[in-house]
Amino acid sequence: MLRDDVIEYSLDAHHSEEKGKKIRKKIWQVTAILTAITFFEVVIGSTIKQSSDYWQAVKWLFIGLTLLKAGYIVLVFMHLGEERKTMKYVILVPYFMFIAYLIFIALYEGTSVGNVWALYGGA
């Protein structure tokens, strides 16, 4: 018996071979960019020791690169890159403000807890 409630979406994917090549090129480009940024993070993280003077800058670099990757993923995979600049700002600015707020709270509370721990003689 043939069901009429099942829609086969793959049959609706009508595009030329040229369009398919363009899509595959974009996928490889996104993969290469994200891989390069991740590789850079791994190299920096594995070469700079945590006890060095640069470690604070490295942590902020990691936060910045992570936000860069997150924004790029949103632009590409949620098709936000094809929208107008105003729409991009409406979506991304509150996102980055919220992430900055979370980072601020984590750092502020972390130092507060550390100060209290030091004051009252934690182990």
Image (cartoon, rainbow, N blue to C red):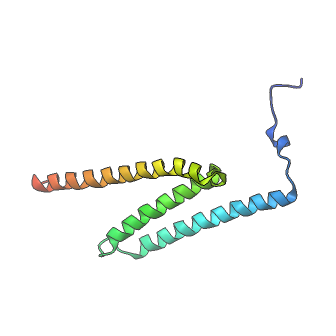
Residue drawn at (63%, 55%), measured in percent from left and top? 81
- Residue 123: in sight, yes or no? no
Residue furthest out toward the front: 86
Of residue 5 and residue 69, the one placed in the foreground of this image is 69
Image-based side of 23 in relation to 48, left or right = right
Q: Position of residue 37 (x, y in %)?
A: 54, 67
- Residue in the picture at 67% in, 53% down: 82
Residue 34 position (above or below residue 95): below
Kindly indicate the quadrant of the structure image that contains residue 6: top right
Residue 27 as seen in the image, left or right of residue 49: right
Across and down, in percent, residue 39 comes to: 53, 69
76, 93: nearer the viewer? 93
State the residue at coordinates (43%, 64%): 62
User: Which quarter of the image is occupied by the C terminus?
Assistant: bottom left
Q: Residue at x 86, y 47 (%)?
A: 14
Q: Quadrant of the N terminus?
A: top right
Where's residue 96, x and y in %? 45, 52
